Image (cartoon, coloured by chain):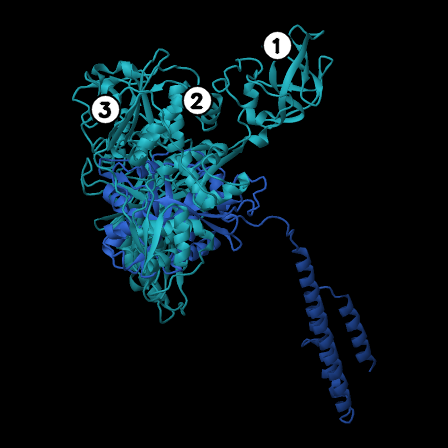
């Protein structure tokens, strides 16, 4: 919320406190300031100038040479403006002056003629036309009223001010007003604050003869107050009011509308003024909308209403949306003669629902949602009509209507002193607590071990002892809280299984040179199509957001594969030659769709992506096997995978019994195209829950072998259909206890190996733990291996 | 006698000219071998009178020893020269680069999260996790944010249905923990959270949070301040300053925003884009757990107090590594990520 320091100062004495120090103290007390704009610093050496003489520039058809009285002297200024005449008073920037936005003005020559400054337009000074109407679209700002040449321009145009943009906390709707912030300023920066003094003269008549008001739903409208003003003269509001509104970011419109906005900024009460002549039947009813009712709002849109929306209606139908937006028919116009000022309190939750349902977001609505204090309703109403009288904008009819069946009661808060001191972590003495609370107008008495605190009416956020603790602490100073560490029972910390497992996997993969990725868990449903998943694929059963930020973020992924393919694609498109990446994330697996009360299973998964010159199926498989090994997963069974996104001949799934551990392989050429991958890519997805279930602890280990091993190489010719994995497994089994390892080292095809066969070269290592093997033992073991290979796969030893 | 002298001189002369082990060996055979010159002289000793034999024998043996010594010495000298030559020949250009080994890198968000978690685990916090797809009840209601409360505006929420949503913070894990355990509670809840914010320089619809919660008898705001000071030093460095500012959150009272001295400019604020010249940057929100929240979660608020805090991991990583654009974290360009293998984190 933008607030002018000058306006603030009219409700609190700040002495000669500098804006900088004021800002510091307000922030320390919790009134955050997002931006501070010192108008006074931005505009320097700009004074009132009187144009004494104007003559045409000899070398130009549009420039004027003016002699300008700037107080101490008369200077010559060349200008291109056309809207001035001799005798006019204009803002004049002298040599070495400063204008908003860091613009510097220096003397110089314009087409050969000396120009010792600049006469300014409103725009150049940051004063728009709405604020200073004599300020033409193009041309100089011509000052109205009497000012002496040489006088500082800043006070005249409200530029002797500092504007703060306060970030008002959600629990402090009272601070959405100049007076509310003045109370804060008084507590934070010293001095006394006050509310505006109200005095309304009135002009006779009786409001009750003019209008009847009825509130049908007091829950949604706890208070409704109104006054009537007749013989309205619609005209611009005075300069001082326009300047203040403008400083606080509100565009001046006319005296009546400006008064409602002025009161809203000053006291925090949203006001509404409507043309009483448009109220049919001289009757106002605050009620819920009827079924099928509709209304045309101020913005010219027709809106369908529902029965839980609160409306302002007359005898014939709804004329405005309570607290959100007025109706088009009751707007203040040039011809308005009689106005009803409405000052009301509407329930925040209801206003919020209505606004959301209609897609509206107005200033008044925002204020009601955060909570408008019903205790200021009447003050604001009286203030508005007082301003009407001050501005001579109309005659205030005597009497007011105030419907407030259940006045709010401010309950005193009892707070144990020891509790307050514990919460705060600092033993502020009770007398000091009382003193601080009283600067906030919280009436405080020390009663034995407790404080009894009665908050002022504008502080409805203070309900419990913890609230009181915060009030004391923020003014005592958060910086005075000492730093201690918790006492009490020491607890064993722990990172938990998910994080520990992630750290193990991360360490392993980083050692292989992998880069970790993090992608969004919500994806585009289209990605399932890109993966060529069949219509009934379980992956397609994903939880869908009602209000996603876009289709591409609309469903919760059931697989990490498309996200990783997306990462590979991005890097390929940016000419990164190779990449090994992985993500530790979750699959979100709904138990039923649409989601019921039972939440989806969130299943941890690891997805690995790979591409580049050295990338192939076996490299990827090697990475996955290294993970299995690291987790002690013994003898997983490898089968071909039927996943649609994998190359049918180069996809595999690893399982132990019924537990699937990993699906991996080369990306299907069609899917590769769908994801715009310019190179072959490889992807693996590992189910970490199952990995944990199949993991085995390392347990006991053996000493280093003390007897030598013997290696024997064998080249076995087998048919193409024989799977090397099966061949090695059977050799390992046949070799028995002496076989330490059987390792593939080459596969050869081509002459002299016959067509349709391949030569598989395997190196076997034999060793006994307790002796050196004899030649006979070695030969027997090798023989058993060869025999098994021959029996099961028809393997022939290659000559 | 002359024969011995001439053998000596001849042999030492030849040895002087020898340049390799083979020549030395040849000389050894020629002089000392079974058919060698010196052996032949020894054999001819039988022609001498028995009185002359011992003296002559001594002389021959002395010469034999001398020649053997000389041969060994020469051999050692040649070997040493050869070693020297080989070593000299093996000189490398040590300025040429080493063999490149693959260097992986943890994602900066993950390494920052790990660092934060570790800091708290070392202070006795236990990690608790919970579902990202969450019930409104745990995400809002139990945290003192009823339906249609304006505080919900600050956390624009993504919904699956009226009651099921993507958690907007990891606080529901705190609520679940308080409902399931009795104090003392000391937990840290890291995880992904979601809000309906468009992706831009400083916002992301999904981000990572680490929230902490302590509930016990006599927990104070000073404990909160002390705990967070440890965190700030561990994550941002020993010299970092910490500042508490009053704030508001529905689930804490009193509440505090916590600023640290700007890591980019060291707190001076001079021409600093990161802290916009203030010297301070906001890193987290915190406060004393609102007694209403304790009661809603079944904890006696007259007996127990507690504190809670929430750290945005993206924000912390951006500050720690001076990352200018949040989108870089989710784009996963290998050239951005690979930088995180090139220095201590």
Q: Position of residue A533 (x, y in %)?
A: 26, 32
Q: Which mark is residue A190?
A: none
Q: SS class of the residue under badge 2?
A: loop
The chain to which mark 2 is attached is: A
State how far apart marks 2 and 3 are (Cα). 26 Å
* Residue A509 appearing in the image: no
Q: Position of residue B23 (x, y in %)?
A: 71, 66
Task: Return the disc, 2 or 1, that comes first in the chain's sequence.
Answer: 1
Q: SS class of the residue under badge 1?
A: loop
Badge 2 density bin: few <14, some 14–19, many ≥20, Cα 10 Å: some
Say which of A658 and A8 sits in front: A8
Say which of B76 and B182 sits in front: B182
**Residue A410 appears in which quarter of the rendering?**
top left
Q: Which mark is residue A251?
A: 2
**Residue A95 appears in which quarter of the rendering?**
top right
Chain B rendering hue: blue
The chain to which mark 1 is attached is: A
Q: Is residue B70 above or below residue A277?
A: below
Q: Is residue A215 left or right of residue B254?
A: left
Q: SS class of the residue under badge 3?
A: strand
Q: Is residue A350 above or below residue B106?
A: above
Residue at point 60%, 17% (across, down): A90
Residue at point 46%, 33% (across, down): A3
Chain A rendering hue: cyan
State how far apart marks 3 and 1 are (Cα). 53 Å
Which quadrant does the N terminus of chain A fall into? top left
Q: Is residue A14 above or below residue A694?
A: above
Query: Where is mark 1, residue-wise?
Result: A85
Same chain letter for marks 2 and 3? yes
Query: Where is mark 3, residue-wise?
Result: A311
**Residue B74 appears in which quarter of the rendering?**
bottom right
Q: Is residue A791 above or below residue A198?
A: below
């Amino acid at each position: 919320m933008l607030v002018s320091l000058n306006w603030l100062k009219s409700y609190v004495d700040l002495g000669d406190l500098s804006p900088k120090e004021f800002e510091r103290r307000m922030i320390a007390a919790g009134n955050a300031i997002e931006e501070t704009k010192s108008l006074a610093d931005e505009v320097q050496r700009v004074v009132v100038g009187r144009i004494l003489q104007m003559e045409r520039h000899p070398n130009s058809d549009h420039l004027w040479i003016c002699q300008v009285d700037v107080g101490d002297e008369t200077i010559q200024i060349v200008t291109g403006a056309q809207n001035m005449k001799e005798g006019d008073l204009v803002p004049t920037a002298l040599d070495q002056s400063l204008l908003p936005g860091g613009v510097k003005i220096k003397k110089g020559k314009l087409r050969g003629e000396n120009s010792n400054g600049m006469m300014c337009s409103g725009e150049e000074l940051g004063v728009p036309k709405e604020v200073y109407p004599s300020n033409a679209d193009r041309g100089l700002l011509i000052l109205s009223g009497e000012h002496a040449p040489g006088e500082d321009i800043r006070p005249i145009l409200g530029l002797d001010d500092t504007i703060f943009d306060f970030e008002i906390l959600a629990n402090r709707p009272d601070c959405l007003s100049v007076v509310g912030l003045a109370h804060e300023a008084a507590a934070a920066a010293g001095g006394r604050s006050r509310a505006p003094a109200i005095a309304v003269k009135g002009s006779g008549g009786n409001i009750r003869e003019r209008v009847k008001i009825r509130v049908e739903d007091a829950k949604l409208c706890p208070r409704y107050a109104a006054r009537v003003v007749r013989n309205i003269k619609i005209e611009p509001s005075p300069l001082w009011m326009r300047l203040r509104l403008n400083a606080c970011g509100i565009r001046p419109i006319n005296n009546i509308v400006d008064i409602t906005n002025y009161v809203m900024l000053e006291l925090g009460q949203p006001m509404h003024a409507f043309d009483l002549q448009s109220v049919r039947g001289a009757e106002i009813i605050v009620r819920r909308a009827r079924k099928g009712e509709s209304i045309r709002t101020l913005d010219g849109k027709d809106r369908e209403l529902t029965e839980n929306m609160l409306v302002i209606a007359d005898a014939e139908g709804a004329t405005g949306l309570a607290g959100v937006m007025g109706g088009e028919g009751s707007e203040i116009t040039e011809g308005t003669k009689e106005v009803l000022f409405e000052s009301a309190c509407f329930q925040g939750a209801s206003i919020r629902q209505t606004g959301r349902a209609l897609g509206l977001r107005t200033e008044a609505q925002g204020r009601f949602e955060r909570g408008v204090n019903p205790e200021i309703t009447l003050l604001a109403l009286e203030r508005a009509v007082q301003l009407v009288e001050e501005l001579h904008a109309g005659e205030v009819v005597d009497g007011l209507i105030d419907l407030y069946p259940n006045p709010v009661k401010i309950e005193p808060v009892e707070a144990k002193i020891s509790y307050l001191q514990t919460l705060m972590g600092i033993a502020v003495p009770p007398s000091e607590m009382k003193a601080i609370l009283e600067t906030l107008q919280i009436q405080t008495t020390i009663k034995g071990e407790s404080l009894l605190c009665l908050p002022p009416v504008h502080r409805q956020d203070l309900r419990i002892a913890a609230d009181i603790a915060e009030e004391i602490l923020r003014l005592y100073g958060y910086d005075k809280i000492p730093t201690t560490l918790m006492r009490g029972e020491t607890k064993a910390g722990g990172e938990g299984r998910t994080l520990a497992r992630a750290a193990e996997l991360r360490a392993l993969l980083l050692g292989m040179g992998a880069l970790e990725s993090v992608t969004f868990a919500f994806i585009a449903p289209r990605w399932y199509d890109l993966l060529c998943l069949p219509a009934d694929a379980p992956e397609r059963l994903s939880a869908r957001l009602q209000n996603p930020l876009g289709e591409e973020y609309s469903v919760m992924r059931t697989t990490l594969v498309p996200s990783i393919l997306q990462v590979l694609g991005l890097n390929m498109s940016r000419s990164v030659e190779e990449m090994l990446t992985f993500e530790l994330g979750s699959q979100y697996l709904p138990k039923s769709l649409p989601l019921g009360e039972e939440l989806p299973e969130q299943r941890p998964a690891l997805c690995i992506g790979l591409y580049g010159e050295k990338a192939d199926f076996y490299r990827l498989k090697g990475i996955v096997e290294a993970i299995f090994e690291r987790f002690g997963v013994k003898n997983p069974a490898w089968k071909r995978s039927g996943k649609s996104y994998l190359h049918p001949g180069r996809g595999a799934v690893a399982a132990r019994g019924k537990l699937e551990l990993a699906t991996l392989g080369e990306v299907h050429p069609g899917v590769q195209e769908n994801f715009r991958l310019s190179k072959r890519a490889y992807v693996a997805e590992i189910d970490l829950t199952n990995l944990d279930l199949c993991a085995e602890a390392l347990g006991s280990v053996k000493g280093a072998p003390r007897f030598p091993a013997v290696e024997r190489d064998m080249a076995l010719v087998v048919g193409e259909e024989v799977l090397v994995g099966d061949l090695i497994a059977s050799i390992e089994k046949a070799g028995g206890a002496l076989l330490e390892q059987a390792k593939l080292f080459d596969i050869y095809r081509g002459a002299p190996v016959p067509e349709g066969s391949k030569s598989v070269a395997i190196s076997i290592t034999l060793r006994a733990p307790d002796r050196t093997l004899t030649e006979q033992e070695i030969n027997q073991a090798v023989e058993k291996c060869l025999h098994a290979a021959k029996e099961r796969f028809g393997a022939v030893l290659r000559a | 006698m002359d024969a011995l002298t001439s053998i000596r001189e001849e042999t030492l002369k030849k040895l002087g000219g020898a340049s390799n082990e083979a020549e030395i060996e040849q000389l050894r055979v020629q002089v000392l071998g079974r058919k060698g010159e010196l052996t032949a002289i020894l054999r001819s000793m039988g022609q001498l009178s028995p009185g002359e034999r011992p003296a002559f024998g001594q002389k021959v043996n002395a010469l034999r020893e001398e020649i053997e010594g000389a041969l060994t010495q020469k051999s050692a000298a040649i070997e040493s020269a050869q070693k020297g030559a080989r070593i000299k020949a093996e000189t490398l250009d040590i300025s040429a680069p080493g063999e490149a080994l693959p260097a992986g890198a943890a994602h900066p968000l993950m390494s920052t999260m790990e660092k934060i978690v570790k800091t708290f685990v070392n202070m006795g916090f236990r990690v608790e996790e919970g579902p990202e797809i969450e019930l409104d009840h745990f995400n809002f209601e139990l945290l003192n944010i009823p339906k249609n409360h304006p505080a919900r505006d600050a956390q624009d929420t993504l919904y699956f249905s009226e009651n099921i949503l993507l958690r907007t913070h990891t606080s529901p894990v705190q609520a679940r923990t308080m409902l399931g355990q009795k104090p003392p509670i000391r937990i840290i809840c890291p995880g992904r959270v979601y809000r309906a914010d468009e992706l831009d320089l400083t916002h992301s619809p999904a981000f990572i949070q680490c929230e902490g919660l302590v509930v016990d008898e006599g927990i104070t705001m000073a404990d909160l301040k002390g705990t967070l000071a440890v965190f700030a030093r561990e994550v941002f460095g020993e010299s970092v300053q910490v500042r508490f500012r009053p704030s508001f959150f529905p689930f804490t009272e009193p509440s505090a925003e916590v600023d640290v001295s700007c890591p980019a400019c060291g707190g001076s604020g001079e021409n600093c884009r990161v802290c916009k010249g203030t010297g301070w940057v906001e890193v987290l929100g915190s406060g004393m757990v609102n007694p209403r929240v304790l009661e809603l979660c079944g904890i006696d608020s007259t007996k127990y107090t507690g504190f809670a805090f929430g750290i945005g991991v993206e924000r912390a990583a951006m500050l720690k590594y001076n990352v200018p654009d949040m989108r870089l974290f989710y784009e996963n360009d290998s050239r951005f990520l690979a930088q995180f293998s090139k220095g201590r984190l």
